[in-house]
C-alpha cells in the first residue's frame, strides 16, 4: 500500500499537469483566434471607411479604380489627398479600400 500511494500521487500530478497544459494551449488558440477576428473586423471597418471616403469625396470626379498596384495607388492617393483636403486617416482608409 505504501508503494502505491507515491505512484498514484505521481499519476495524479502528471494528469493534472497534462490537463493544465492542454487548457493553456486551448486558451492560447482562442486568444489567437480572437486576435485574428479583431484584426479582420478592423480591416473590414477600415475598408468600409475607405469606401465611404471614396464615395463622399472621390466619386464626384472618379470611378473606383480596378487593378491599381499598391505603389501606384499610394502615389495617386497621396497627390489627391492634398487636392481634396483629406486627412491622413482618410488617406489610410482609401489605401486599405483600394488594396484590401
Image (cartoon, rainbow, N blue to C red):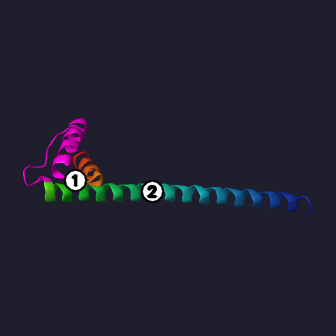
**Which residue is depicted at the point 18% across and 39% down?**
68
Ranked by sequence position, the earlier of labels 1 and 2 is 2
Q: Nearer the viewer, residue 69 or 92?
A: 92
CA–CA distance in space, label 1 to label 2: 30 Å
Q: Which mark is residue 20?
A: none
Indicate the position of residue 86 as horizontal and vertical percent values.
Answer: 22, 53
Indicate the position of residue 47 as horizontal and vertical percent values.
Answer: 26, 55
Q: Nearer the viewer, residue 39 or 52?
A: 52
Extreme-left residue of the structure: 61
Q: Tell me where residue 24 sits by quadrant.
A: bottom right
Horizontal side of 47 relative to 18 (left or right) equals left
At numbered mark 1, what does the secondary structure look like: helix, strand or loop? loop
Q: Mark 2 highlights which residue?
A: 35
At numbered mark 2, what does the secondary structure look like: helix, strand or loop? helix
Q: Which residues are magenta?
A: 58-85
Horizontal side of 24 relative to 29 (left or right) equals right
Compared to residue 91, the image places residue 71 above or below, namely above
Q: Mark 1 highlights which residue?
A: 86
Residue 84: in magenta span: yes
Amino acid at each position: 500500500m505504501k508503494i502505491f500511494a507515491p505512484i498514484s500521487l505521481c499519476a495524479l500530478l502528471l494528469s493534472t499537469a497534462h490537463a493544465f497544459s492542454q487548457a493553456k494551449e486551448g486558451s492560447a488558440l482562442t486568444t489567437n483566434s480572437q486576435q485574428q477576428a479583431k484584426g479582420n473586423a478592423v480591416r473590414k471597418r477600415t475598408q468600409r471607411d475607405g469606401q465611404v471616403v471614396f464615395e463622399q469625396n472621390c466619386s464626384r470626379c472618379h470611378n473606383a479604380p480596378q487593378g491599381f498596384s499598391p505603389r501606384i495607388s499610394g502615389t495617386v492617393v497621396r497627390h489627391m489627398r492634398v487636392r481634396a483636403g483629406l486627412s491622413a486617416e482618410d488617406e489610410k482608409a482609401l489605401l486599405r479600400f483600394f488594396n484590401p
